[in-house]
Amino acid sequence: MSEPSTPEPGRPGAQAGPVAFLGLGHMGGPMAINLVKAGYTVTGFDVVPAALETARAHGIATADTAAEAVAGAAVVLTMLPSGKHLLDAYRGTPGQPGQSGLLATAAPGTLFLDCSTINVDEAREAAELAVAAGHRAVDAPVSGGVVGAEAGTLTFMVGALPEDFEAVRPMLEVMGKRVVHCGEHGAGQAAKICNNMILGVSMIAVSEAFVLGEKLGLTHQALFDVASAASGQCWALTTNCPVPGPVPTSPANRDYQPGFAGALMAKDLKLALNALQSTGVAARLGPLASEIYDSFAAEGGAGRDFSGIITDIRDRSAH
């Protein structure tokens, strides 16, 4: 285990307890780095050796196991691929030496802060497990992508009891520019999937409109100039425009390098679909968007920005 960082007196994290950060990938790594810069004492763990190496290069202490990272932590922050990963980590493998779950390893009263994007039901189950084990629980999925993680400008959608939200707010404000308390356990995940369902549906609509405009002889700039100042205005158009030119910073100008990858949009829409089905909402566009992005990810779009869906629409259009 490498030596933990030492916070400087007067810095924002100097009075905070130690943080265990589990999941140091493309999002988690930069988030952990920003915590260290703010003076938090962070011990990280990841199953990928390269992620640990990068973390150490940026001053993050690392542990050999998740349990080692969690021991003595006041906050356990998780950024994991799925709800199954989170629940398995919390529970561990009963009866197997060295496989105790994080909830059993942590000191009583530890604050478990999950920033993964998972099913609402899984988030609520994770919170129930944590509380039953004598801990505190917060779900706080993020929006803003890798760029936001690196810049510390993420948006956090938080599900927590009011007192737990206030306890974790200073840490979230280090990693993000907007922190919204959406309700109690699971509400953060609910807000995340509802928002991303809007985003997925609107990107498909914007992309279809641009392909239609091409067929009708409109230039991309002309359509953008009209729609961006009229009732068609939306984030998918004005910030993440799916054609090169009108918005120079959009991924379309970088051959659709993400950004927010198609695989992640497919995942989030699948979570939205699960929630739609479990609640009985008579949605039509959400399920269709999920189907479209599933195909896009499976047919080469997984690693491209989700705005690259326009190339799929264009390819499927009659010539």
Image (cartoon, grey):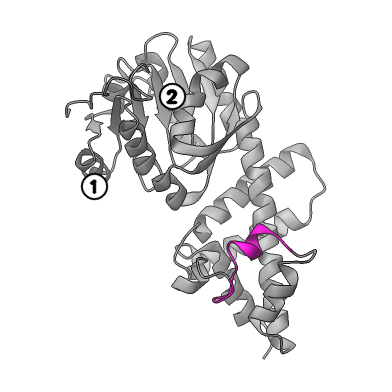
Q: Which residue is mark 2?
A: 90
Q: Main secondary structure of the magenta part?
A: loop
- Name which residue lies at 44% across and 66% down: 257
Q: Nearer the viewer, residue 282 or 28?
A: 28
Give percent across and percent down for residue 116.
49, 38
Q: Is residue 126 visible?
A: no
Q: Quadrant of residue 181?
A: top right
Q: Which residue is mark 1?
A: 50
Separation of residues labelled 2 and 1 (CA atoms)? 24 Å
Q: Is 240 colored magenta in this rendering?
A: yes
Is disc 2 placed on a helix, strand or loop? helix
Q: Amino acid at mark 2?
A: Tyr
The mark that comes first in sequence, 2 or 1, is 1
Image quarter hosting the C terminus: bottom right
Above-or-below relation of 234 to 118:
below
Q: Nearer the viewer, residue 276 or 15?
A: 15
Give percent across and percent down for residue 39.
32, 27
Q: Which residues are magenta?
A: 233-246
Q: Quadrant of residue 218?
A: bottom right
Above-or-below relation of 318 to 159:
below
Q: Amino acid at mark 1?
A: Ala
